[in-house]
Image (spheres, grey):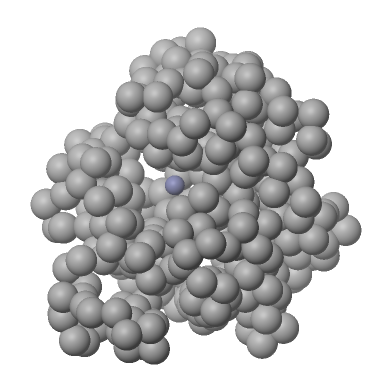
Amino acid sequence: MPDDKPWTARQEKLIAAMPKVDLHVHLDGSVRPETIVELAAERGLTLPAGNAEGLLPYMRAPEDCRSLQTYLGTFAFVLAFLQDGEALERVAYELAGQAAGENCLYMEVRFAPQLHTGQGLSLEAVIGHVIRGLKRGESDFGITARAIVICMRNHGAEDNLAVLEAAAHWQGRGVVAVDLAGDEACYPAGLFAPLFRQAGKLGLPVTIHAGEAAGPDNIREAIVNLGARRIGHGVRIREEREVLELVRAARIPLEMCPISNLQTRAVADWASYPLRQYAEEGLLVTVNTDNRTVSGTTLALEYRKLIEHCGVSVEAIAGFVRNGLHAAFIEEPVKQKLLRQFEAACLALKLGAD
Ligand SMILES: [Zn+2]
């Protein structure tokens, strides 16, 4: 692994101007603290601190975050404020705005509708409100945004089936895929094969969080038995050559989230982060934020860390964005339009192939 490299003014300028893609970003992990202050005031809810700065420790993973468990703990705090349609629409809209603000061309926002039904919203209604917020974001900010609906590993089969059915209700009208998230180590992917057979029957594309907090077996299961067309994280693929070969042969894109992967200790440090190795081995790497607030990140910051710590070039970053557009679950004509837009921007920035 190369030594750390200083970030240059040229790189900073190119990264800022480059059109970006975020395929893996959680709605509840990306809420602005300022918004929580306002949502709480409007709803008469008490907060442990009266301003955004004071709330940040409750919404951001600690600097010395040691595990996925600690990381996931920050979500419980935010969820209490996301239980009505207005709040959901607002945070979805603002997330589209945050992404567009750093030249993100396309994003897929994911959320688990079951976690937003505490005040009686139906699953279909939760999804509908998020989509409305994203659509408003599209027209105000010029970004293209779609939704991914998450089933939770710790929820029962019946509840998750209801989530799939609600996702199918909105498919083609904002929802582009379904996902499985939560405690990967305690609930291995194989347990969910029957559920995701249903996703297949409903015609819903599948991405699965795998190879983050558990080993490559989960990645194999996700692809072979859950029908995953993309893998969330996949950091631990290298532990089993056969799984790496499977991912390459099946051309399964990896939704890698470098800063989050470091925080959850999916890898020990930047020197052992395998993103560059995977790209060089021919895997379809994409770079994503996971949680803008919990991880304190942006796409530009993710790219910067890769340039500084993993010896990745700006041209290689452009390649990961291109992979992201090809891997997008969006309708084909829109994908082609976005690709043309991206290539024209790369040409203007004189960003050729690596
Ligand atoms: Zn995730």
Q: Position of residue 172 (x, y in %)?
A: 82, 55
Q: Residue furthest left?
A: 64
Residue 297 in the figure: left or right of residue 115? left
- Who is closer to the viewer here, 244 or 4? 244
- On-image quarter of the N terminus: top left
Residue 337 in the figure: left or right of residue 191? right
Q: Is residue 90 visible?
A: yes
Q: Is residue 342 visible?
A: no
Q: Residue sitting at 36 percent across and 53 percent down? A: 306
Say above or below: 80 vs 233.
below
Q: Residue sitting at 63 percent across and 26 percent down? A: 195
Q: Position of residue 348 (x, y in %)?
A: 67, 76
Q: Residue sitting at 33 percent across and 71 percent down? A: 8
Q: Residue sitting at 71 percent across and 55 percent down? A: 175
Q: Residue furthest front?
A: 120
Q: Position of residue 198 (x, y in %)?
A: 72, 28
Q: Position of residue 286 (x, y in %)?
A: 54, 47
